[in-house]
Amino acid sequence: MKKEYGYFNNGGHQYVITDPATPRHWYNYLWNDRYITFISQVGYGEGFAQDDMGRRAQLLINRQLYLIDSEENEFWTANALPINRGYSNYQCTHGIGYTEIKLDYKAVETKFRVFVPREEQCEIWTLKIKNKREAGCQLKAIAYVKTALDGFFRPQGYEMGSADYDQKKHALIGMNYGAFGGSDEVPIYGFLTSRSDISGYDARNDAFIGPYSDECRPEAVEKGGCQNSDCYAEKMCFALENTIELEAGEDIELHFIAGVTVDTDEIPELRNRFFTGDAVQKEFDATLSKLASDIDGITIDTPDEGLNNLFNGFLKHQASLGSRWARVRHNGFRDTNCDCECLGIVNPSLAWERAKRILSYQYSNGFAPRTFLDGRVQDRGYADNTVWITFNIYHLLKEIGDLSVLDQPVPFNDGTCASVYTHVKRSVDSLWGDRGELGLVRLHGGDWNDCINLAGLKGKGMSVWLSIAWFLANRQFAEIARLKGCPQDAERADTRADEMREIIDRHGWDGDYYMADYTDDGKKIGSHECDEGKIHLIHQAWAVMAGVDTDGKGAMAMDAVEKYLVTDLGAVMIWPPYTYYRNDIGITTQKLPGVHENSSAYLHACTWKMAADCILKRNETVQEDIEKILPDNDKWVEKKAEPYILCNSYYSKDASYRYARPGQSWRTGSGAWFLKDIGFYVFGLQPEMGGLRLNPCLPPDWKSCSVTKKFRGANYQISYEQINPGPCNTIREMIVNGKTFQGDVLPWEENGDFVVEVTLE
């Protein structure tokens, strides 16, 4: 019997965890444009600030909030560690923009909340304590930040930082040097401050945790409180102690701010801003209101309640995270473009501003880097980053519906500047000019599957997938050029498209599906001729998505996907998995069978399969795709994943005992593309410059469903009814605001309200 760990609440905007011992840490991500942190159901996580060039100040690599009852000779944590302490009434609420952990221990109730405000480089903690005992008590509350501001601790390593308590600024402040906000090394300060007067502090890790203890049993806590230690050329930490006296039934609220700055005068300013009156609660409310408005552009109602909760809450929030912070560990150019494109169905104006930001890291010759990190634009040899520019701009243009956005100036990473249109044009031209001897686009250090990183390093390897993706980008650019009134650009694109279609058909088709790549030595990857990795998933799906296939080959390729790749867990990335290392292919062959790109059910790829199935109007298959992707749908296989967010993959049967276990959550394009699948392909909300086109592909079990969408200032309430037992993809009747409507592009007017009733057969 499946164990339940919690439930959705507040229309999917909250997930309430009722058991702290989840199968692994279940995280929530909190962020603004300058600072990001994540926190699990027991408080574990990291937090750092980042400047415009990806220089980072790693403030936090774990957090704890200790309670000490000296009279009872007891201590525990408000974040439920260790989990076997004997807590009661435990509850962790992961909300959009915050996490709150609630529990009781020996008649003391605590509520520990963390959120990131809208602008500042910090996170704000609130601890509410209620004495439920029949007598008064005295407690100590210690907020603790394990930091990497001075680097990660290594035995026998050099420790260069310093930290102490600044009485005037009422803050524990640590300092180390690093490049932040510019290329020069500057002092960077991490700090922890409390609204209430402190009764102790520790800045030295060995004084608080101790050289032979750990964060679950710090030596200072076992001794009864902080040791008032400073730190000088040792491993630093931040720990602040408040002493509290509570009468029976009395409660109190404490506030802490943990943050990063290059100017310590900002610390008292933050204290004045947030530690006055109810300013913390007002900022909390404003933060949640902003985040809710960022993702209120579309909601759905289907017979699948799990899908409704996921889509209407955290799935949209996950896309928003990716469109600003990419994969968090680095600032992926491809990743940000991809997630901006998908966020466009929810909030195109926000997605557009973020799209222009990431566009500014493109080279003026049209090429695009893999990431920007540590103060540098880093190419890392990947060939595909450029192609995502067009997909992003094309779809956002259709959502916004205003051609003038193409004329907006955006800088390149060398300081020159050009219009958005020029950025797109140069990106398409760049890949067209980087083709191998067969006419396919060169692979270099990898395409979207950046674990095929050794096949093209000599400059001769070629990517079939990237050639297909370029075909789609070029096709979209041709349409953009015509809309903008640039017929010569459009005609040139048309000529190139005809040539590339023929090249892909001749050199990419492998009999009954599309192959993957050619190595520098001309060997095929993803072909019948291979002993392993004979077929790769994304090439088949993208051939349909791009419309590059001829003579029904796209449908044939997707039939091969069903034959070779589809499992009860979902479609796996490749078949059969690689079992030994290939130094002419790359890291994919180093990964264990069934893991990630080496034959897991890689959900980002599965979302593209789902898009192709929608285009081919394979309704029953689309229903299976949805059920297998959903983390909390166990119709096919029970997964051990967070129910409220998507992960990057589920490990396949080749992964032995790890079968159906999830990969990493949040930091993946799976969530954003699943969001787009549901809105764009399943519900069929496909914008054109003339309005919103309906082109649905609904699962057969969804006899009735509905969606609301904001579109160019108008509001649409669209309901679907399917009247046949089989696939229903033809609009039999459409009624708009009570009147029969002909066609599939909905009427539009500024601030208009449209109630649309669609009958499908």
Image (spheres, rainbow, N blue to C red):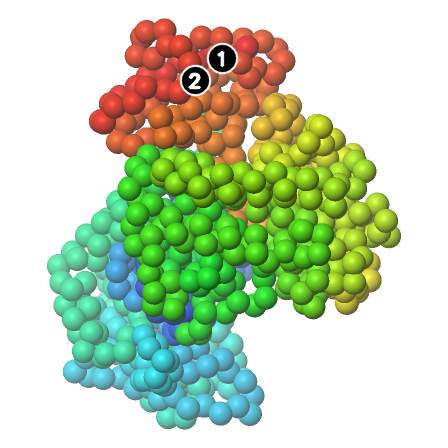
How packed is label 2: few (under 14 Cα within 10 Å), some, or many (20 or more)? few
Residue 724 position (above or below residue 512): above
Tag 1 and tag 2, C-beta contact below 8 Å: yes
Q: Pointer 1: what residue?
A: 731
Residue type indicated by callout 1: Ile
Question: Number of callouts in the render?
Answer: 2
* Residue 503 percent across, percent down from the top left: 69, 44
Give the CA separation, mark 1 to mark 2: 8 Å
Closest to the observer: 426 or 455? 426
Is residue 663 shown left or right of residue 96?
A: right
The image quadrant where one finds the C terminus is top right
How packed is label 1: few (under 14 Cα within 10 Å), some, or many (20 or more)? some
Residue type indicated by callout 2: Asp
Q: Residue at x 21, y 74 (%)?
A: 267
Return the disc, 1 or 2, that comes first in the chain's sequence: 1
The image quadrant where one finds the N terminus is top right
* Residue 277 percent across, percent down from the top left: 13, 59
Residue 115 position (above or below residue 724): below
* Residue 728 percent across, percent down from the top left: 57, 15
Q: Pointer 2: what residue?
A: 744
